[in-house]
Amino acid sequence: MADAQANPGIPGSTRTTRLAPSPTGDLHLGNVRSLLLAWAIGRRAGWRVLLRHEDLDASRASGDACDAIEDSLRWLGIDWDEDATRQSEHLDPYHDAMRRLESRRLVFSSSLSRRAVREAAGAPHGGGEVRFPAELRPDDERAWRFDGSDTNFRAITRPGPEIVEDELLGTHRFDPSSEVGDQIVWTKAGRPAYQLAVVVDDHRQGVTDVIRGADLLPSAARQQRLHADLRFETRPRWWHLPIVHDESGRRLAKRDGDTGVEALRAAGVRPDRIIGLMGRWSGMSGTPRSITAAAFADLLDEDALRRMVSREATEPLRFTKEDRRWLLEP
Ligand code: GLU
């Protein structure tokens, strides 16, 4: 990483990262941590930092939630370059990508339900994921044409390993064909699925460095496949960050409503407390102390980041009652 830079969005900067929240409600402390780390890594190095709302799931995402996330980020001291984008506002590039895959005969429509796939495929794969096997690919030629219709489309996943080289977590080997099989790239809502949308956007926005929670590490392998299928010449570097758990060891999630930024803000918590807690979690101090996001970025050198990652590999981080008490202390 380069030294800290004061100017955001340095002209001529060759690297770009992005903050990509899903606007489905209040950001929880796990989301904040990943976003803050991505922002701090990008800002220290003088990269372009973009904000992209991943709002394609119309049943869960909303424009108000996008506004609320921007407000929470600003309040925390996290900024971004250029106007924030919303995936739902630019659907053409996803159609183009589907046509590209169609021209290589790599996508087909399938209206088989999850249940039908599960039954046909035998026991579900570990993690509850349902694998779509090659035998269920349709024979009907018409199914291999993409018409943008409201049907699930899947991309062929060829067998064999896919190696993910991660800047923080090292080398990981996946086998998407035995994990997920032919993955969904277009949904029956008539919109791209997460994996396709991310790949298309990271490419068209010139994202060189994807920094996000480690729960998405297996997705990196699937996204690499799509990068290759779309014949994109470059693909981003990956940086997967350890994630935060609750006291019982479960991943912090939106169901833990009282760890939401806006809920904490409404309870009178100051932003520099929240960032201070993130600082302690990142090993910047033994006991938490209030700091600004800018100070956090200054303190996060590469050694601190790597120490944090190796510590959490053996001792996963938990948001404890003491953490909460400290946030709420007057
Ligand atoms: N929108 C995803 C989330 O909030 C992140 C996707 C990504 O970083 O690739 O979990």
Image: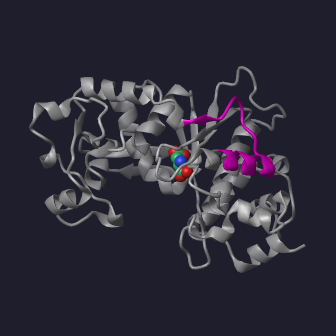
Res. 195 image quadrant: top left
Q: Nearer the viewer, residue 234 or 226?
A: 226
| Residue 70 magenta-highlighted | yes
Residue drawn at x 58%, y 67% as measured from the top left: 252
Location of the C terminus (image quadrant): bottom right
Q: Nearer the viewer, residue 288 or 70?
A: 70
Residue drawn at x 79%, y 60% as measured from the top left: 284
Q: Furthest-right residue in view? A: 330
Residue 280 appears in view? no
| Residue 265 magenta-highlighted | no
The spot of residue 140 in percent (x, y) is 10, 35
Magenta segment, which residues?
67-86
The spot of residue 37 in percent (x, y) is 69, 50
Residue drawn at x 31%, y 25% as measured from the top left: 99
- Considering only vertical position in the picture, is 270 above or below 45? below
- Considering only vertical position in the picture, is 72 above or below 192? below
The spot of residue 13 in percent (x, y) is 70, 25
